Image (tube, coloured by chain):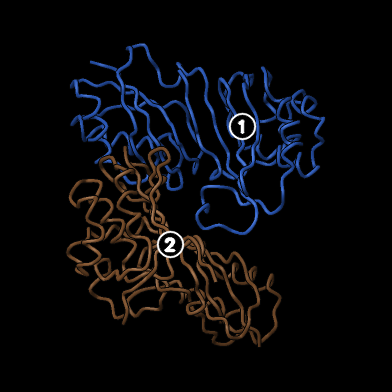
Chain colours: A brown, B blue
Amino acid sequence: MSRKLLTIKYIGTNYHGWQVQKNGVSVQQKICEALNKLYSHEVNATGCSRTDSGVHALKYCLHFDDDKNFDNSTIVSALNSYLPNDIAVVFCKSVNQDFHARYSVKQKTYIYKLYTGVRDPFLEGFAYHYKGTLDIDKINEFAKHLTGTHDFAAFCSSKTTVKSTVRTIFEASASKKGNITTFKFSANGFLYNMVRILVGTLIYVSEGKIDVLDAEKIIASRERKNAGKTAPAYGLYLYDVKY
Amino acid sequence: MSRKLLTIKYIGTNYHGWQVQKNGVSVQQKICEALNKLYSHEVNATGCSRTDSGVHALKYCLHFDDDKNFDNSTIVSALNSYLPNDIAVVFCKSVNQDFHARYSVKQKTYIYKLYTGVRDPFLEGFAYHYKGTLDIDKINEFAKHLTGTHDFAAFCSSKTTVKSTVRTIFEASASKKGNITTFKFSANGFLYNMVRILVGTLIYVSEGKIDVLDAEKIIASRERKNAGKTAPAYGLYLYDVKY
């Protein structure tokens, strides 16, 4: 028996997130179906995080237990032949038996893509089309107050069930290239809808609906209503996972 | 009456190219349907080129005659509201009555995208997945002999109906960034399937199936069978049109 860490990439458009759901097809379901074919019995896949419905992943990690001692390269090519076009296995490596795709995570990074200007078919479903211009300086001014260890209850969907809403953000920033703005958030963990609420809040800061000096006040309030709207899922990408 | 030049962008996946077809939906049909709605009568759209089924366009130009003196910005936003998500109008400007989207073209540029390595869902349908590594130096060595004025009959589908197969290529090159190779071709015009055959030929050069020194010999032969395979349509993009 050997534990395997699998790195995958997927377009989230057609999936109800990672986690197996009653009401729709999930990425986990597709991965498990492929693993079941390869191993000829049920194999459980444990992911590094739930992701919201429609969210994409440039790097998503999961683990499973291999009881047939397949080569890592065989696992990659076999799973890729079973998976649909919008999910691909990038990498497979052997890890210690105590490795856990979710609990061993040290840092996760999400990016959020937004574009301005005329509607672009090539960005449809892959970046949020924002009708206006963003004030990147103001956004970054507010964003720097988000870094550090804080109680992020204000930036968390009320549907959450977690015990602690304290997280440490290592990086929060926005950068612009042409008409595309990329928000980047690295943390030791994220709350339910947290990145999308952070992005919605930063958009409000740019629009002057939230004062650029109010970051600490909003965090301290622990009130979801003081933060901005939840930005649409399809601009969000899980970008990196560090163990 | 004022002639308008329209710049559009489209994902070719769901279309049988630009030209109206009996057997499938074309981009021209979608543009004409949108124009007909805006003008409340039939409006003809003349494109800068046919494009093969499945080929994309980052910049495609067409002209039509406006008999209602609409503002250019009104035309852009109205047409965009009528068009499907995979076609967008980027720009509209007024041109002289003797301007012709096809006959006035001075230079057209196509790019072709190819990627290597593990299957990538985000490039599916947007770049050709090549299983191997390309020798960019060899490709560029061969490509430089393609520039200039030549009879390109060897690089033209036998289905062509054009009188002259002589064209002038201003640029033919390939460049690599990460695992993506981009081929670029600028010319005063292209023959039927020409760019896809040029790409297929350059791949053969990289693979040693065509000798890097044989460019002039193949051109002189005027025989389609001496060139490489026709690369798949979905890696090809009309990139620029100059008048």
What residue is rendered at 50% in x and 60% in y? A58
Q: Circle 1 marks a residue in which chain?
A: B
- Residue at the spot x=41%, y=37% of the render? A178
Q: Secondary structure at mark 2?
A: strand
Q: Which residue is mark 1?
A: B194
User: Considering the numbered disc 1 on the image, is that residue within a helix, a strand or a loop?
Assistant: helix
Q: Residues within 10 Å of mark 1 (few under 14, many from 20)?
A: some
Q: Position of residue A193 (x, y in %)?
A: 31, 67
Q: Position of residue B234 (x, y in %)?
A: 53, 45
Give the residue at mark 2.
A170
Q: Is residue A58 left or right of residue A204?
A: right
Identify which residue is drawn at 28% across, 38% down.
Answer: B80
- Answer with the quarter of the image where residue A110 lies: bottom left
Front-lying residue, A215 or A162: A215
Residue A131 is situated, as x and y percent measured from the top left of the image, at: 25, 42
Instruction: Name the chain letter of the residue that bears numbered label 2.
Output: A
Image quarter (top left, top right, bottom left or bottom right) of the C terminus of chain B: top left
Q: Is residue A19 left or right of residue A77?
A: left
